[in-house]
Amino acid sequence: MMLARVISFISNPIFIFIALPFFLVYKTTRDIAAAWIWTIYTLVFLFIFVSFVLIGVRGKFFSDIDVSNRQQRPILYFAGSVLLILYLIILNILHGPLILFITSFGIILGILIASVINMKIKASVHVAAISGLITSLSIVYQGYYLLLLLLIPLIAWSRVKIKRHTVPEVVIGGILGSLLSLIMYFITKFYIFT
């Protein structure tokens, strides 16, 4: 049970979004300084989002840091969407990298889809986020990154083991994250960078 808790903790979507801007910006610009700058920019918004969740948990507005209560998730999705829109507005003003715009729109699309799915079943955001990231890294970097795909079932197992989700919930999360990454990749490859 302890191993499942550790795996679940380190696969938190917040941790995943910390690394994502660096990999994306560096891959598209080959500029390590720009990758760090835009990663720090993204961290500011992640800090605000995490603070919102922690304040919500402390104020008993959210059940826990995973916002496990399905009825509380629309508020989380709304707050995340508002922050992402603000992120995009400032990113536009600062003439940020196109890849961050594309990724942000993909995340907003994911939030909208998750909100709809959430009406019927509590899809695993942990598994969706890790599936999306790993699918993206596997497509873009290939090679040894394909081995990262093995982490998806491990994280799904951890979420079921600690009783945060059921098997159907982690499967839906995995499919959602992977499909969204594939869609965003093909849109980017064939319509934007051609």
Image (cartoon, rainbow, N blue to C red):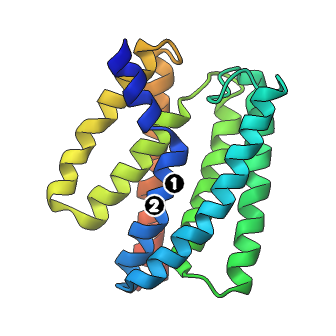
Q: Is residue 34 above or below residue 103?
A: below
Residue at screen point 46% across, 14% down? 162
Q: State the mark number for residue 69.
A: none
Residue 175 image offset from top left, x and y in percent: 43, 37
What secondary structure is found at the residue carrying circle 1? helix
What secondary structure is found at the residue carrying circle 2? helix
Q: Quadrant of the N terminus?
A: top left
Tell which of 32 and 72 is nearer to you: 32
Q: Is residue 87 left or right of residue 165?
A: right
Residue at screen point 31% across, 29% down? 153
Q: State the mark number for residue 17.
A: 1
Residue 189 image offset from top left, x and y in percent: 40, 75
Q: Is residue 144 left or right of residue 78?
A: left
Residue 152 image offset from top left, x and y in percent: 33, 36
Asked whether the viewer can see residue 193, the reply is: no
Residue at screen point 65% across, 88% down? 95
Q: Which residue is mark 2?
A: 20
**Alpha-carbon distance for marks 2 and 1?**
5 Å
Q: Is residue 160 above or below residue 37?
A: above
Do labels 2 and 1 touch, CB within 8 Å?
A: yes
Q: Is residue 97 left or right of residue 70?
A: left
Q: Which residue of the protein is positioned furthest toward the left in this rendering?
A: 143
